[in-house]
Amino acid sequence: MPGFGTGGDATSPREDAEVAGADLFETAREIQQFCENRGWESCFIGGLAVLRWGQLRVTRDVDLTLLTGFGNESYYVEELLKHFKPRNAEAAQLALSRRVLLLNSAQEVGIDVSFGALPFEQLAVGRASRHEYAPGLSLRTCSAEDLVVMKLFASRPQDVRDAQGIALKHGKRLDWAYIAEQLEPLAELKEEPEIMDTLRRIRKLA
């Protein structure tokens, strides 16, 4: 089970900075540089990606997909814990079973690192692109389409609202065929076919 395009950028750098805050952006910059220095493939998802593609909302943590593959997750856990603080005493053990490592930055900003290995996760990281959130601050996020897939896979109320916001903002510029193609096998994996009904309702907003 996963731990977690094309369209115009949703917000201006000034608006992004106002909604998120300096500590969150500094944390994002730090973990992005940490991964790049090691040649690790990753991209931001969650609230930071919503700031780029969707409706403005407050976000307080950093969500990242890191491609680890299957079988070598302990290496990534050990390396990350050399630099970032675990959010709780069981963080390392839980990361190996749930594929999400919960960390805190020096600024006490939460960092959720999802270990990616599935074909969709590899595709999403490969399709990611940079966005300038503030002068001199360029972060690599997933595409709008891949964010819709992730949000509808999670399907919590806030996730569905986020997906609706992306649909309202970008409409027909989104590649809806790609979204459906990627989401359907994930909905089957989760055994929640109703996720596709949610997608059809949201597409009507476009």
Image: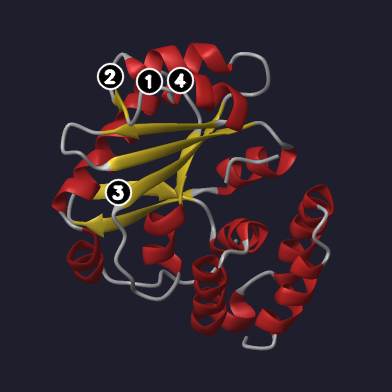
For label 4, the crowd category at 10 Å Cα-Cα, with few meaning under 14, some 14 to 19 and many 20 or more, is: many
- Dot 1 falls on a residue whose secondary structure is helix
Question: Left or right: 30 with respect to 45?
Answer: left
- The residue that disc 3 covers is 138
Cα distance between the residues tagged 1 and 4: 10 Å
For label 1, the crowd category at 10 Å Cα-Cα, with few meaning under 14, some 14 to 19 and many 20 or more, is: some
Residue type, mark 1 in image: Leu
Cα distance between the residues tagged 1 and 3: 22 Å
Cα distance between the residues tagged 2 and 1: 6 Å
Q: Foreground mark, 1 or 4?
A: 4
- The residue that disc 1 covers is 80
Residue 9: where, in percent of width, then height?
Answer: 41, 69
Q: Foreground mark, 2 or 4?
A: 4
Cα distance between the residues tagged 3 and 4: 29 Å
Residue 142: where, in percent of width, then height?
Answer: 51, 52
Q: Between disc 1 and disc 4, whose residue precedes?
A: 1
Cα distance between the residues tagged 2 and 4: 13 Å
Locate the C terminus by quadrant. Answer: bottom right
For label 2, the crowd category at 10 Å Cα-Cα, with few meaning under 14, some 14 to 19 and many 20 or more, is: few
Residue 30 - label? none
Residue type, mark 4 in image: Ala
Q: Colour scheme of this structure image?
A: secondary structure
Q: Are marks 1 and 3 in contact (CB under 8 Å)?
A: no
Q: Foreground mark, 1 or 3?
A: 1
Q: Between disc 3 and disc 4, whose residue precedes?
A: 4
- The residue that disc 2 covers is 83
Q: Residue at x 57, y 46 (%)?
A: 4
Q: Foreground mark, 3 or 2?
A: 2
- Dot 2 falls on a residue whose secondary structure is loop
Dividing the picture into quarters, in which one does residue 37 lie? top left
Question: Left or right: 189 with respect to 37?
Answer: right
Q: Are marks 2 and 1 in contact (CB under 8 Å)?
A: yes
